[in-house]
Image (tube, rainbow, N blue to C red):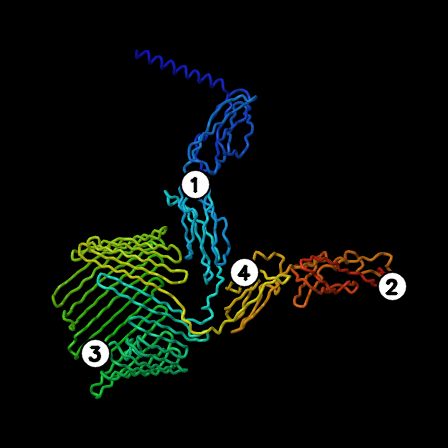
Amino acid sequence: MENKFILIISIMFILANMISIVSAQESPLLIEVLTPSIESLPGEPVTLLFRLTNIGEEELSFLPQVELPDRWELLVPIESVEIAPKDSKVILLSIKTPTELRAGDYSIPVFLKGKNQVQFSKFEFRVSVPIVKELKVIPLNAPQYTLAQPYTAKFLVQNTGNTPQDINLTLKENLDIFSRIEPNSVYLDAGDSIIIRVKADVPKDITESAIHRLQLIAQNKEDAKVKDIAKVSVEIISIIYSKEELYHTLPVEMTFSNEDTFDSNQMELRLKGSGQLSDRDSGKLSLDINKKSQSIKYTHPDFFIAVGHQNFYLSPLTEDGDNGFGIDFKTMNRRWKWNLNRYKNSDGDNRLGASLAYQLNQDSNLSLQLLTQPELGDLLSLRSNLSPTKNFGVDLEHGRQIESSAEDSSSASRLKASLSNEFLYTNLKWERKDIGYRGIDSNRRKVNLHGEIYFFNPLRLNLNFIDYIKYKEKDTTIYHDRNFNIALTKSLEKNYWNFKYNYSDSLDLEELERIDQYGQSIYLTNKRYLSKERWLYQRIGAKKSFDRRNNERDILALYDLNYHIPYREDSLERYLEIAVPLNSNSKKELGFGFRRAYKINDYLKLYLKMKVEDIFSERYLVSGEWEYKSLNKWKLTVESRVRWSPKLDKSDFKINVAYKIPFNLRLGHRSDIGQLSGCFLDESGNGISDILVHLDGLTVLTESDGYFEFPVVATGVHYLTVQSDKLGANDLIIPRIPWKVKIDSGQKIEQNFRVMKGASLKGRLKMIKATESTLEAGGVFGQGSEKDDMNFVKDIMIELVNEKQSYRYITDKEGRFHFDYLVPGEWTLRVYRNGLPKSYKIEPQQRKVRLESAENRTIEIKIIANLRPINMIEGKILEVESD
């Protein structure tokens, strides 16, 4: 049975091959599909190739026919194909797919038909179309401007992909307008589209013009990367003037803040502002009033006065930033500079300070300082600040404290010198103070030397040395601190290196826990920018300290790593911080977190920070900030912070709410403004409404009677322009626009404008030819030839004038001229001869022309050739005799 089955299968296989051979022998055409399967995106052209070979003995002729799916397009028409015996041809089919073609596999059958539509053969191609998700947002229309009124902007949202999409629609705007989207989500099939309307509720009481920028974002709900954005900008024009502009005001900001923690609650009210007292004032007033301190300052080019809590300064050895409540006054008269202050310091002691300085030159001066302090003794110092050259300066001061007896008097001295050039900067400070000076309980000496050496642009060497000592007597030192560090820095655009060595030696016998130790440290730091906003920070180093009192030594070696990875799309910034100790005496730290700053629009900002400060000690931090700034410039800020550690059983909480309200404090009427008003009238004297009138940065809208007014205009020269759909291309405004106006302080100017249709005047110069019958013997008309006559109609200047305006035109080669946009009324036309010979007469050379509104007048000016006599001179031919 099994052998019989195998025999049947073998016979069937042989018969199939025989049938195939017979079929091949019956068909003289061999077909080879070169592109059996190809992939194409929607809307792209597809090229299909196949080769035909004539294996017969006769020439073959046939026409390929293609059956395309609906909306597919054959780009190149198919022509009939003729193939000689034993020859072959490659046939190209160019097809374009529809833009909204769905994803899938498409079969393209091809038929080869010969004479009488007899089918030779049939084969097919397969075109695969992948899934494409694309969106397109197109702004359709939006007004260029709106006069503080609500408006609607239209957008077209298209599904340009080949698969249905569920779409979210969101809006971003830079102003606090509260715009709405209708609708805010849509479902679109492939190739479908929808019109989206955005309604912007512009407040009518807006007092400042601004640009409203709208962004419509269409985003696929399932795939956030599939999105598109369209933008429009609309100018919001304020038509309301604030009465505050009539007054000179002082900008003031009032801040109310409330801070809460686990242990306390603090409330604070603060007023802060600065500005001029009047528009003619060259000084500046500043005020800062809160619960802890109050101060008012006035700065003028010739003097300075301040009242309230502040830092008082005369010189480093007298008053050096002492904080207190009082008054400070400074003035300068040519080379003399005075300074006088009186205040009560934080200890409740009264102080009176005065200084007198003489300016030797721009960088050098001598000064004398006096400070009264009854409980300690008055201070008197002499100071000289000299700069012999641009690169070298010396500041020297000596002070003495005046006691009741000369034996109790103490003194102090200081020196500061600096030297710099292109490659070096050094600074030396030396200071000494005797015991009792300003109440100190020990003698003090301090030396500080700082230097910077620039080898070349990115490489810099820094040296710093400090030696500070306190002692009662010569051999009884109670405090001594010496510190020396050297740093070598190389700073490039994307790479920063720093090598730093430090040595310190400290002795402190003043504290209860006395200190007597020295230490050394060495660190190598590198900060490398891997990209514009991604960087890697590394630090490796060691620190050694030795306690001489307890004979204890401590060594710390560590490695720090800080890696920042910003993610721009959603303003997310991730970072990693690692501190790895290289010895067992210190604890290791591993921290990470992220920061995110999100700007919703120009008025609302959000900031969030989450950080694991150390994963080993379980220290965590969460902080955030919410800031809202309104169109009226008030601002609300909420800051919060939570830090906790379950392992250490510690927690910290803080929240701060601050509300800032800006306002203007009226100080008086402004003297640097004027007013401008007027009307826009048509030819009949009726007012024209809804014309936008611009005066530099100011804009108003004409009322129903054509009236407009600028109640507050800064003094100076301004230019007035207009904008309106009611004005046609041929409309004239008299006076002409742009209109120049100069406004003086307190001046009120009224100016009416007439809107009328302009007229035009065109014409040509016509040469009048003479007839032969009028020609006399021995004479000629003009220059004697028609060609010469016609040359004189070009380059002739035509002038058209009235009482206020003048226009000129140079004729072309045909003698034509043209004047447009002319004010209706009486004009005078003049023709200048220019280079026209006297043998020609202009008729008329001057004439009156009256033009009506919207009139198009054509005139002709004649140039007549006058008779010009020719003088004949007799002569003879000179003959030259030959040799």
Query: Of callouts 2 and 4, which one flags the residue occurring earlier in the amino acid sequence?
Result: 4
Residue 37 place in picture, x, y as percent: 43, 31
Do tag 3 and tag 4 residues touch (Cβ < 8 Å)? no
**Residue 165 appears in the picture as rendered:** yes
Residue identifier under label 1: 188
Residue identifier under label 4: 692
Query: Of callouts 2 and 3, which one flags the residue occurring earlier in the amino acid sequence?
Result: 3
Q: Which residue lies most toward the left here? A: 550
Q: Is residue 440 shown above or below 269?
A: below
Mark 4 surroundings within 10 Å by alpha-carbon count, few (fewer than 14), some (14 through 19), many (20 or more): some
Residue 627 is drawn in which quadrant?
A: bottom left
Viewer-nearest residue: 75 or 661? 661
**Residue 834 appears in the picture as rendered:** no
Which amino acid, by three-letter code, is at mark 1?
Answer: Leu
Which amino acid, by three-letter code, is at mark 4?
Answer: Leu
Viewer-nearest residue: 335 or 243? 243
Residue at the spot 49% in from the left edge and 52% down from the top edge? 142
In the image, taking residue 78 as reference, residue 194 lies left or right, namely left
**On residue 463, which mark appears?**
none
Mark 1 surroundings within 10 Å by alpha-carbon count, few (fewer than 14), some (14 through 19), many (20 or more): some
Query: Of callouts 1 and 3, which one flags the residue occurring earlier in the amino acid sequence?
Result: 1
Query: Of callouts 1 and 4, which one flags the residue occurring earlier in the amino acid sequence?
Result: 1
Q: Determine the CA span between mark 3 and mark 4.
A: 74 Å
Residue identifier under label 2: 874
Name the secondary structure under disc 2: loop
Query: Of callouts 3 and 4, which one flags the residue occurring earlier in the amino acid sequence?
Result: 3
Residue identifier under label 3: 440
Name the secondary structure under disc 4: strand
